Structure formats: C-alpha cells, structure tokens
Image: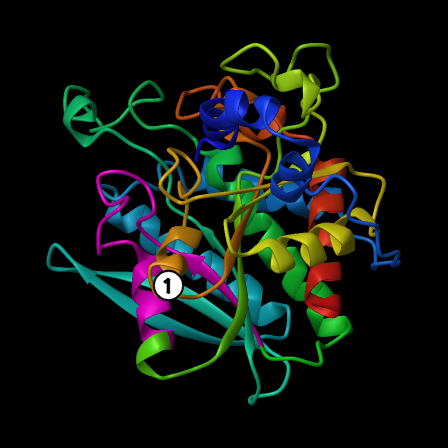
Amino acid sequence: MSFIKLLGTIAVLLIATSATVVGVLTQPFAAAIASQPPPVSPERLEAHVKRLSVDLYPRSQDRFHNLELAAAYIQAELKAAGAEVSVQDVNVRGLRYQNIIARFGPAAGPLLVIGAHYDSHGDAEEGARHPAGYSPETHTPGADDNASGVAGLIELARLLRDKPPSRPVELVAYTLEEPPDFRTDHMGSVWHARALNESKRPVQLMLALEMIGCFIDADASQQFPVPGMGLLYPERGNFIALVGRLGDFGATRRAKALMAGSSPLPVYSINAPSLIEGVDFSDHRSYWNEGIPALMVTDTSFYRNMHYHQSGDTFDRLDYRRMAQVVQAVFAVVQGM
C-alpha cells in the first residue's frame, strides 16, 4: 500500500481548496467515542510475528510449503481463541492455497469482515540465483508486512472470545496478496469477497489490517513526497491511519471516532477516489470491486517503514505496545459500528 503517496498526489488540491473540502477528506473533527477495550498482550503479538517471520520464513507464493505451515499456525491459533474456523480454498497455478476464516457472533445479520494477508513479498526469479531458492535480499521476513496484521487478527479473536460481538463477524487471513498476484483474481481476498456476493450475504463493512506495527517518535520520521504535507498530517510516524474511498465518509468517520476513543494512539484518516494511486493498495480493494464498503488500517508502509519489502523488515523493529493499541482500536470498531 502507499497511503502517503496518494496523499502527495492530491496535496496541492487539498491545500488550494477550502477548509470544508479538507475537512471532508481528512475528517479532522470526528469526535472520539470513548471506550475501554480489554488489554492486549504485546508479548503475544510479538510471539505471533516472530513465529511467522522467523520460524516460517519465507511466506511468499513460491514457497508453498511454508505458506501451508503459516495457514496451519493461524488456523490453530484462531481455534484456540474459541472461533468457529473454516478454510476457503484458493486454487491458483494448480495449487491449493488457503484463506483461513474465523467466525464470531450470531449467524444472521449484516456482516463485519476484518482481514489481513499472511503471505510476504518474495522475488522468485532473483531467489533462484541462491542455493536455497531465496535469501533475505530476495524474500523479506515480512514482519510488519504483514505478520503484524495477522498477529492483530489472532489477538482480536481472543478479545471477541471473551466479549462476543452482537453482530456476525468474520476474521479472515488471506493468501496471495503480494506480487505477482496483487491486483489479480488470484488474491485470496478476491475469492472471499466474491463468495460473499455470490451468497448474497449483506456486509456492513470490511477492515483490512495492512502493516500495523511500525511507530517512530523521531522528528521527520514520517516521510512526505511533496512539501506542505505536514500541514495536514504529523511529521512523526507515531499514528495509525484509516484509508477510505470517496463515498465511504460515514463509515470512515464512525470508525475513526471509535478508534480514537479506545486508546491514546493518534488516529488520522483520508477519503480519496479509488483512481488515485495507492488508495487501493491492499485487500480492501477486492471488496470495493464487489461493491462492499471497506477501509484500510495502516501504519503508512514505506513512507514510514524504510525496511518495506526488504531484509530489514524484522520482528525486533516493531512497536508491540502501540500495535496492541491498534488491536484495541479495531475491537472498538467491532463493538461500536
């Protein structure tokens, strides 16, 4: 995904237009809705990220066996959290990849979907130059991208076990989000979104957890592609962002208010047209294409995390205390949407 890049694309427009337009697109005055979510263990989040990014490295589409092991780990953890768990086959290139689906709440009613992809980026062609078929230079450990989102999904399941939602909820761990499958029908999220539409299941909202573990307090740690971006967003990479498309203003505003009231973690947002580069750079895009409202929850990817898709995207570089606050914020959305 490329949250800040898309902001740069429309920065001149935002700065030149009225405060009303800026307010509509960035939702600066969404009043926080206070709540007290249960605590989330930073230690457990770290253990999940380490398991996925170290023990099951690499998790790219060309390392099928490791993806199977990652899917089995996620399935076992969601079952241990008390979820009703099923597997959705994603048949690509003659192989049976898997989405892992955990269900909570009643069976009937509009559905809330929260998802995160568990595959990581790898360059199979470059990896073939190495004896093992991969190296840290060709296949990232994928701690922030996106073991962090999957860890958040697993710990969210624990919260929902202890405080079941009043609405039906599906937590989905997707396969095949990364290239070469990104923006194709191979994406696990495409298979899930289409299945929902084919079943005529009403969906209230989908949230994509896309990199939720990188937080930096240093000055100028949040990068901007053009001058003036700091007028709208902080220069320090210490916030979580919500990304929505034009038309999803109400969902963005409500989700932002619920997230902002759940912890001290700052929450910023933007609504932008899907034709702007970057606004659809994750699994939420698959739901937009099926006419389903969807938002992305993100730490803004490579405009903050300089180790994106590189060997340095390791578990020891993430901030698990603030990642825990993101999980609490998503729990607040589940309980309050």
Return the residue at label 1: 99
Residue 155 is left or right of residue 135, and the answer is right
Quick one: 312 or 56, which is closer to the camera?
312
Measured from the top left, where is residue 93 in percent x and y?
Answer: 12, 54
User: Does residue 115 show up?
Assistant: yes
Residue at the spot 71% in from the left edge and 50% down from the top edge: 256
Residue 177 is left or right of residue 220, and the answer is left
Residue at the spot 67% in from the left edge and 10% down from the top edge: 220
Residue at the spot 38% in from the left edge and 84% down from the top edge: 200
Measured from the top left, where is residue 110 in percent x and y?
Answer: 55, 80
Residue 77, magenta (yes or no):
no
Measured from the top left, where is residue 43 in percent x and y?
Answer: 72, 42
Q: How many marks?
A: 1
Quick one: 153 or 275, which is closer to the camera?
275
Task: List the single residue furthest toward the front.
Answer: 18
Measured from the top left, where is residue 331 in percent x and y?
Answer: 71, 60
Task: List the single residue furthest toward the left.
Answer: 94
User: What quarter of the picture does the N terminus occupy?
Assistant: top left
Q: Assign a secondary structure to mark 1.
A: strand
Residue at the spot 61% in from the left edge and 69% down from the top edge: 80
Residue 133 is left or right of residue 94, and the answer is right
User: What quarter of the picture does the C terminus occupy?
Assistant: bottom right
26 to 156, vertically: above or below: above
Q: How is the image coloured?
A: rainbow
Counting other residues with Cα less than 10 Å from the Cα at mark 1, is it few (<14), some (14-19), or many (20 or more)? Answer: many
Residue 57 is left or right of residue 202, and the answer is left
Task: List the single residue furthest toward the bottom.
Answer: 108
Quick one: 257 or 11, which is closer to the camera?
11
Q: Which residues are magenta?
A: 169-196
The amino acid type, in three-letter code, at marker 1 is Asn
Quick one: 138 or 303, which is closer to the camera?
303
80 to 63, vertically: above or below: below
